[in-house]
Image (cartoon, rainbow, N blue to C red):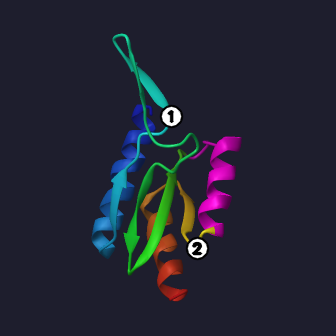
Amino acid sequence: MGKAENAVTKAVRQACQLRGAMVVRVQAGGFRVGEHFIRGADVGSADLIGSFMGRAIALEVKTAKGKQQPSQVEWAAQWNEAGGWYFVVRSAEDTLAALDEVKKGI
């Protein structure tokens, strides 16, 4: 995750806190530590996963020009099929709108 996406992630998390949503950062894929390979969450997992008003939410954070990878599109479909709420967010404003959508759907 680059500096621009880190800034967006921070704004998204603050928007979640403002509305009372609880989210945690998810490390998808894997990485090497010395000779060891550490596997994180499934490839394609959303950047932030949590709960809002009793609903499971997943937020994929993107910059203004960022695009979902095919694995992220597939993961989103599975999340939604399982009854979760998945959103691609690019700002705090997008996040607040997404949370409003969840609230309306309750």
Q: Nearer the viewer, residue 10 or 103?
A: 103
In the displayed structure image, the side of residue 93 where residue 77 appears, left or right: right
Tell me the element at label 2.
loop
User: Relative to 22, is 42 above or below?
Assistant: above
In the displayed structure image, the side of residue 63 where residue 4 appears, left or right: left
User: Relative to 78, is 72 above or below?
Assistant: above
Residue occupying the point 28% across, 67% down: 17
Mark positioned earlier in the residue sequence (2 or 1):
1
Point out which mark residue 15 bears. Answer: none
- Look at mark 1 in the image and give the residue it sits on: 29
Can the viewer see residue 79?
yes
- Residue 33: give x, y in percent of width and height: 34, 17
Residue occupying the point 58% across, 44% down: 44
Give the amino acid at mark 2. Answer: Gly
- Look at mark 2 in the image and give the residue it sits on: 83
Q: Residues within 10 Å of mark 1 (few under 14, many from 20)?
A: few
In the displayed structure image, the side of residue 102 where residue 76 appears, left or right: right
Can the viewer see residue 68?
no
User: Relative to 95, is 104 above or below?
Assistant: below
Q: Is residue 72 magenta?
A: yes
- Residue 2: give x, y in percent of width and height: 44, 31
C-alpha distance separating marks 2 and 1: 23 Å
- Residue 61: give x, y in percent of width and height: 49, 50
- Residue that extends furthest to the front in the rendered view of this protein: 36
Give the amino acid at mark 1. Answer: Gly
Tell me the element at label 1.
loop
Residue range (magenta): 64-81
- Residue 8: give x, y in percent of width and height: 42, 48
Q: Nearer the viewer, residue 32 or 69?
A: 32
Residue occupying the point 38% across, 70% down: 51
